[in-house]
Amino acid sequence: MQLTRLVYASHHGGTSEESLRDIFDRSCKNNANDGITGLLIAGDEDFLQLLEGGRTAVAECMMRIMKDDRHQRIRVLLAGEARNRLFSHWSMRCLKAAEIPLEIQDRYWVNGVFDPAQLPQAKIEGLCLALSEDNSDKTPEMAE
Ligand SMILES: Cc1cc2nc3c(=O)[nH]c(=O)nc-3n(C[C@H](O)[C@H](O)[C@H](O)COP(=O)(O)O)c2cc1C
């Protein structure tokens, strides 16, 4: 399998708890079946998502996500081959931006706001890496 990683940002302009719950649930369920792992951050206005898995699985998942009218202005920020998974413990690590540890927010938020459009590529990579190493919501066995 050619491991592929793709990161995109999109705009939702305000989403409901119900819609977010549905997106989080669907992502975990489908990705577990498709061998996809990753990260989904929901900010007040924007999403940032990292998908990693087989090339075809990631492409098919991205096609479905692009057709979803719960977000717009999808911009692919990074895409390519990867040597290993960053989020192997999560079928999708779903986080609200406000729940992210403050020391990570301090490093990556722009004027106190989660705004992926303002982040250069190195910062996007740094944020994803920091969240792959953050153990705050893992069970003790997973954090070992
Ligand atoms: C921001 C966002 C992220 C999403 N992430 C995923 C995902 O990681 N995996 C997935 O299968 N669907 C994801 N979805 C949902 C898909 O767009 C789509 O609704 C779903 O895959 C449809 O499949 P189902 O009806 O068989 O569950 C996401 C949707 C949004 C708006």
Image (cartoon, rainbow, N blue to C red):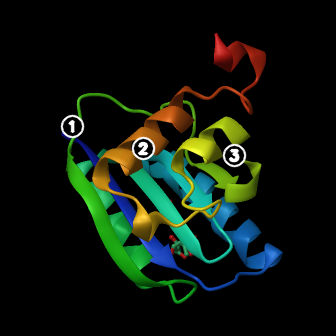
Query: Residue 91 location in percent, x, y?
Result: 55, 44
Q: Cβ(mark 1) to ligand 1 < 8 Å?
A: no
Seen at 66% across and 17% down, the residue is: 143
Quadrant assignment for the N terminus: top left
Assign a secondary structure to mark 2: loop
Which residue is the extreme one toward the front?
111
Q: Is residue 89 visible?
A: yes
Residue 111 location, quadrant: bottom right
Question: Which dot marks residue 35?
Answer: 2
Label 2 sits on what residue type?
Answer: Gly
Q: Can you say whether 66 is above or below 49 in the image?
A: below
Seen at 31% across and 45% down, the residue is: 122
Q: Residues within 10 Å of mark 1 (few under 14, many from 20)?
A: few
Query: Residue 13 location in percent, x, y?
Result: 62, 86
Which residue is the extreme one toward the top?
144
Question: Which dot marks residue 1?
Answer: 1
Sequence-wise first label, 2 or 1? 1
Q: Are marks 3 and 2 in contact (CB under 8 Å)?
A: no
Quadrant assignment for the C terminus: top right
Label 3 sits on what residue type?
Answer: Ile
Q: Are marks 2 and 1 in contact (CB under 8 Å)?
A: yes
The Cα–Cα distance between marks 2 and 1, rounded to whole angstroms, is 11 Å
